Image (cartoon, rainbow, N blue to C red):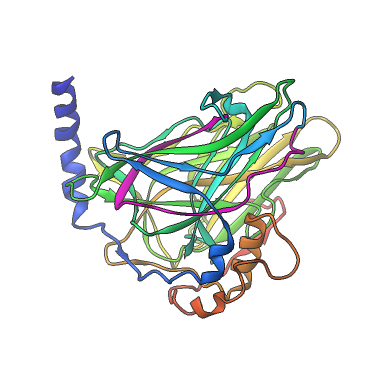
Amino acid sequence: MRLRRAFVIVAALPIGLAGYAAWSAVPEQRPVLPLAWTTLARASITADPKRRELVLELPPVDLPAGAGHHVLQPPACLGEFPVNASIYAFHAELRDQDGRLLPVDLLHHLNVMDPAERELFLPIARRILASGRETGEIRFPWLLFGARVRAGERIIANAMLHNPTPVSYRGVRVRLVLSYIPDGRLWPFFSVFPWQLDVAFPVGDKSFDLPPGHSVRSYEGSPSVDGKIVVIGGHMHEYGRTIEFWDATLGKLLWHGEPAPAPRGEPSPVPLGRFYGLSGIGLPIMASHRYRVRVIYENPTGHTIAAGGMGVVGGLFIPRRGAVWPSAEPSNSLYQQDVRHFMGLTGGGISGMEGMHGMGGMGGMGGMDSHAHDHGSTP
């Protein structure tokens, strides 16, 4: 085991040492969240230094038998990281009031956003972690990649639960268990940022009604900074045939994924694309180019399936050395709409949005001009 671990470290050194000096982002000063955000419910984030794990936990809720999605959901919660670290693995779990582990199928999804930083392709709050019933454990090569978190960094988390079973559960807590490397180590060699590009951008529900027969949906945008994609994956619903990532400026297909077999009615997993190896690392992308996510469906049912479509690509991104990942601009209308949707609120101002205009102007990188496409033209 020790010999194998030593071989992994030695094999990774050429990649890490070649890229460490060339690819290192400079963090922009983070805006201070306004006091109004403190009205949100609290998510606890506790550290276990011996296991090198962080556990994010939402407040408990009860799940009556056979209630489906019509249950009292955990509220959107504000949490704060307690340590400086790099996250390299995570998984979601559910526990009841007695600490018993529950079936993960009760979890529809769990999302975590950083409200102080923007997305790579949009001026909305950056999603940093997501998990669902089909996700399982997400794990990066710990020596190479880690997503950095800072003590005092605040996040907002939400989750959706459902219970189609004949069993009731009380005091159910949604937990996200994160494995980390503490600061002060030589590794991981690369600090990575999660990113996503969705055919249903810019804001709102990411599922869409799926028409019968052949259909294509796409979206374009430009990244806020230059960098390299090191991991890419995709997600589609049933009847999805392929999902693609294009350099629309060059008219070049950069990656595509085909769904793996899945039970009828279940999401079809798309295998990951990994752009790293002993010969080099990363697929370059440039802020001066436009990029397109494109999903193709073949719906054989003969009728429109409500909320039957989805198409998103995402993965890990390394900003160019010296590049500054821009902070959020909460005065931006897209940012405000997106936060309202994330927190399950619609209509007028929400608790926590008032007073956020003072954070505007902090993210001077801005400048992404995205346009939605809802037709079947080829790239």
Which of the 4 quarters of the picture holds residue 261?
top right
Residue at 27 percent across and 62 percent down: it is 321
Q: Is residue 215 above or below residue 263?
A: below
Give the image quarter of residue 6.
top left
Left-right relation of 107 to 31: right
Percent position (x, y) of residue 152? 37, 59
Quarter of the image holding residue 55? top left
Give the number of callouts.
0
Frontmost residue, 371 versus 178: 178
Q: Residue furthest right?
A: 303
205 is within the stretch colored magenta: no
Which quarter of the image is occupied by the N terminus?
top left
- Looking at the image, residue 354 lies above or below residue 110: below
Q: What x and y, as percent, mark residue 271?
A: 49, 32
Residue at figure coordinates x 48%, y 80% from the top left: 361
Q: Nearer the viewer, residue 175 or 108?
A: 175
Residue in view at x 50 percent, y 73 percent: 367
The picture places residue 83, in percent across and down from the top left corner, at: 31, 51
Question: As drawn, is 265 to the left or to the right of 198?
Answer: right
**Which of the pair 249/323 is nearer the observer?**
323
Magenta range: 68-96
Residue 250 locus on image (x, y percent): 48, 58
- At x 73%, y 43%, the residue is 215
Residue 70 is inside the magenta segment: yes
